[in-house]
């Protein structure tokens, strides 16, 4: 641990899908070469833990995105949460009763800004068969009882509704990340 360097959890959007493949070892090395420290990854979908000299989460997200986009040759948006923020989000989600009948799968769409006003109303009122959503400040809890690839509540639709950059994670993965890195300070 390097004193004074904030530690954050980074969720990358659209890596290792649709022909946009990167090796996590190479990605970690690239970030370390750019001055990030303590870089770790969890599974291949772009979940990272790192330390940075940047003092705000927005500055960290911007720097990670710039470094990785230049390295990979395609845009890689980054959304950052502190371990404390992720812990609080997981606890909040655990306190929300099922949005649909039992058997639904839960996902979190992490957004790069708070979701409010008409966008929040649209998502909170989402009423497609087998799909429900709840805005949680800057994140969206989605619950699906239909196959993920059949949903109309896609990441692209959430981005169109909100104007935010978002990236989805299965709630099981978010729990794993919180257990692994959520207490790290």
Image (tube, rainbow, N blue to C red):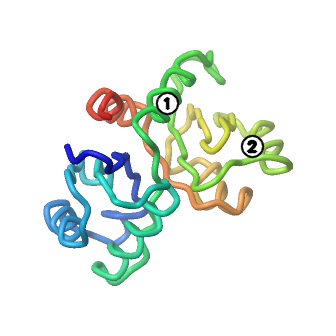
Residue positioned 76% across, 40% down in the render: 126
Q: Residue at x 59, y 47 (%)?
A: 151
Dot 1: what SS?
Answer: strand
CB atoms of marks 1 and 2 within 8 Å: no
Residue closer to the observer: 31 or 143: 31
Disc sitting over residue 123 in the figure: 2
100 and 63: which one is in front? 63
Residue 69 in the image, given as x and y percentages of width and height: 37, 77
**Quadrant that contains the C terminus:** top left
* Residue 46: assigned label: none
Query: Residue 67's image quarter?
Result: bottom left
Give the quadrant of residue 65: bottom left
Residue 24 placed where, x, y %? 19, 60
Q: Quadrant of the N terminus?
A: top left
Tell me which residue sits at (39%, 80%) in the image.
74
- Residue 2: x and y, percent? 22, 48
Give the vertical position of 152 relative to 127 (above or below). Answer: below
Q: Which residue is mark 1?
A: 105
Question: What residue is rendered at 62% in x and 19% in y?
Answer: 96
């Amino acid at each position: 641990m390097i004193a004074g360097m904030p530690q954050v959890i980074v969720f990358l959007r659209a890596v290792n899908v649709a022909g946009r493949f990167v090796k996590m070892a190479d990605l970690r090395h690239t970030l370390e070469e750019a001055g990030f420290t303590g870089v770790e990854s969890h599974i291949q979908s772009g979940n990272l833990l790192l330390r940075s000299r940047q003092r705000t989460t927005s500055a960290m997200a911007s720097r990670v995105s710039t470094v990785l986009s230049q390295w990979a040759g395609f845009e890689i948006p980054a959304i950052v949460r502190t371990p404390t923020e992720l812990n609080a989000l997981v606890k909040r989600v655990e306190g929300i009763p099922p949005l649909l009948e039992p058997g639904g799968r839960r996902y979190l769409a992490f957004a790069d800004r708070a979701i409010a006003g008409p966008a929040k109303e649209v998502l909170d009122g989402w009423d497609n068969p087998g799909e429900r959503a709840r805005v949680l400040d800057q994140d969206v809890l989605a619950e699906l009882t239909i196959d993920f690839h059949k949903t109309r509540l896609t990441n692209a639709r959430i981005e169109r509704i909100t104007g935010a950059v978002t990236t989805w994670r299965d709630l099981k993965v978010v729990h794993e990340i919180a257990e692994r890195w959520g207490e790290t300070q």
